[in-house]
Image (cartoon, rainbow, N blue to C red):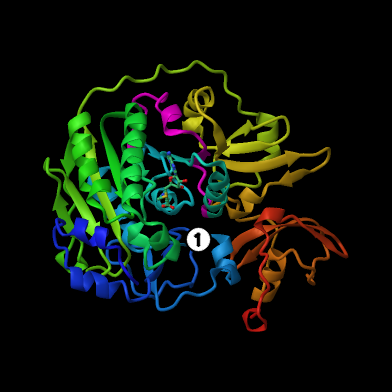
């Protein structure tokens, strides 16, 4: 791999940069890692080597075809680059309590940071996982559904629109679109598309995004800024821009010397954390945490009548084990949120585009309730739902929406599980069944013979 000369030149000024080691590390393959779900326990990768800065992070010796693992589809783990899991360490050191927080993940697709945030936050906290690009927002929605948390809501708004939520968030994570040099080993396109001009363009876009969303952070709130770029123009120089334009102080995050993370200091004294594959077991990454020191306007509380639908709640409450609030999303379908977040729901409803709030419950029919796919993947689903455990072959056939035999004498709805984790619904008609896996969730790839078992 030929690293662009201009990038190497820019990196000469970076603390700890060792050109020879950096180039040599880029001749090695990328590291593969996953982050385990803290609630959906499974045997998958649990015994593997731990990513040192993340309790649920695990290294893999090789990259399997994740699509062929039903546990991946059940949300037992998320495939995430190891360096970016340092967000867990940053959260532990900057947020004293993980409950009653309002957190925004502004640039969230496909969902790596958001699934980590969801795992970190307590149930009374609210995570708004936002992605401006609609097609990417649907991937985000799918990944957050798979992760299964009721207190994660997916939105699709421009950062400017989220500024309407003045002083609302305790934590804002901006994992900014960047020139992507940190991903050279993972993605050949990142190398092909790298240019000095693009670094400049990204730097300006990053400033615009940060300035746009800034009003939404409350006083003393924490901004976590990250990129997967090595370029100081997108890293330390952005911290300096923040220190010049906005009222911030830096937050120091501790790390073990053995981890190989390089703490850098921007010209204006703000701390940043650099990850480089010649020093850490992971890809290129940069992260920094800052505190807002200026006052922020707060939003007026809204008056509202509860939209909790008691009748639908009674009908659907067998689906979930938690005490939830049942709201009607549109004319037909219902969704469940934590009752503590009802005021938030009303407040946000009028101001931003909410794509998915909480767990979709499904649709009532004349004599029945059509359960939503969300419920099957929710960590709050009731443990007493009628369910059928599948073999790997059956699970893959279900996920491909192929025919397969199931010994279901009884009629009605059944949750299909694999290793005890929900995969989706079928409705049994006695002698046959209908597969209710949403079409766009279907595995499309052909499955090699050896992978059925
Ligand atoms: N946080 C994600 C994760 O951990 O999986 C990765 C985010 S990626 C580095 C940056 C995201 O910013 C992309 O999903 C991209 O679509 C989005 N984006 C692009 N332009 C943007 C803009 N002008 N404002 C906000 N987000 C933008």
Mark 1 neighbour density, 10 Å: few (under 14) some (14–19) many (20 or more): many
Determine whether, in the image, residue 160 is placed left or right of residue 392.
Answer: left
The answer to whether any part of residue 247 appears in the image is no
Q: Residue at x 69, y 34 (%)?
A: 312
The answer to whether any part of residue 371 appears in the image is yes
Q: Position of residue 117 (x, y in %)?
A: 39, 48
Q: Is residue 305 above or below residue 67?
A: above
Q: Secondary structure at mark 1?
A: loop
Was residue 163 drawn as part of the magenta stretch in this picture? yes
Q: Answer with the quarter of the image where residue 401 lies.
A: bottom right
**Residue at the outermost right position:** 431
Q: Which residue is mark 1?
A: 40
Residue 96 vs residue 355, the one in the foreground: 355
Q: Is residue 437 above or below residue 187?
A: above
Q: Residue at x 37, y 71 (%)?
A: 31
Was residue 346 drawn as part of the magenta stretch in this picture? no
Residue 350 vs residue 65, the one in the foreground: 65
Determine whether, in the image, residue 12 is placed left or right of residue 168.
Answer: left
Determine whether, in the image, residue 69 is placed left or right of residue 347.
Answer: right
**Residue at the outermost bottom position:** 450
Q: Residue at x 23, y 62 (%)?
A: 8
Determine whether, in the image, residue 224 is placed left or right of residue 300.
Answer: left
- Picture quarter with the C terminus: bottom right
Residue 295 vs residue 201, the one in the foreground: 201
Q: Answer with the quarter of the image where residue 323 lies.
A: top right
Residues in magenta, as a range: 147-171
Q: Position of residue 156 (x, y in %)?
A: 52, 37
Q: Position of residue 106 (x, y in %)?
A: 41, 40
Q: Position of residue 146 (x, y in %)?
A: 55, 54
């Amino acid at each position: 791999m030929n690293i662009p000369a201009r990038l190497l030149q820019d990196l000469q000024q970076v603390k700890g940069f060792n050109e020879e080691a950096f180039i040599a590390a880029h001749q090695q393959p990328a590291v593969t890692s996953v982050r385990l779900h803290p609630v959906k326990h499974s045997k998958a990768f649990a015994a593997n080597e731990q990513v040192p800065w993340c309790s649920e992070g695990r290294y893999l010796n090789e990259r399997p075809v994740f699509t062929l693992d039903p546990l991946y589809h059940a949300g037992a783990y998320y495939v995430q680059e190891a360096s970016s899991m340092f967000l867990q360490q940053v959260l532990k050191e900057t947020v004293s309590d993980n409950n009653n927080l309002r957190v925004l993940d502004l640039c969230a697709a496909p969902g790596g940071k958001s699934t980590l945030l969801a795992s970190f936050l307590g149930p009374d906290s609210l995570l708004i996982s936002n992605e401006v690009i609609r097609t990417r927002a649907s991937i985000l929605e799918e990944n957050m559904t798979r992760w299964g948390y009721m207190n994660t809501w997916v939105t699709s708004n421009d950062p400017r629109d989220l500024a309407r939520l003045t002083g609302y968030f305790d934590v804002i994570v901006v994992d900014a679109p960047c020139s992507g040099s940190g991903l050279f080993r993972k993605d050949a396109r990142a190398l092909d598309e790298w240019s000095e001009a693009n670094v400049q363009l990204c730097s300006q876009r990053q400033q615009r995004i940060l300035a746009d969303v800034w009003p939404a952070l409350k006083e003393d709130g924490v901004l976590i800024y990250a990129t997967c770029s090595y370029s100081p123009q997108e890293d330390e120089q952005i911290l300096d821009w923040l220190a010049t334009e906005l009222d911030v102080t830096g937050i120091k995050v501790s790390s073990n010397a053995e981890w190989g993370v390089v703490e850098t200091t921007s010209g204006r004294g703000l701390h940043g954390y650099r990850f480089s594959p010649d020093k850490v077991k992971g890809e290129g990454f940069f992260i920094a945490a800052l505190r807002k020191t200026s006052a922020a306007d707060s939003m007026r509380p809204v008056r509202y009548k509860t939209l909790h639908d008691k009748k639908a709640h009674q009908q659907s409450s067998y689906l979930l084990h938690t005490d939830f609030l049942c709201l009607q999303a549109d004319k037909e379908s219902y969704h469940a949120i934590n009752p503590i977040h009802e005021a938030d729901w009303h407040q946000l409803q009028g101001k931003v585009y909410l794509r998915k709030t909480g767990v979709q419950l499904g649709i009532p029919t004349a004599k029945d309730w059509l359960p939503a796919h969300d419920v099957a993947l929710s960590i709050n689903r009731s443990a007493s739902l009628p369910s059928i455990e599948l073999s790997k072959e059956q699970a893959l056939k279900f996920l491909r929406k192929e025919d397969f035999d199931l010994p279901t004498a009884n009629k009605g709805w059944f949750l299909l599980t694999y290793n005890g984790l929900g995969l989706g619904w079928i409705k049994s008609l006695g002698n046959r069944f209908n597969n209710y896996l949403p079409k766009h969730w279907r595995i499309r790839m052909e499955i090699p013979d050896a992978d059925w078992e």
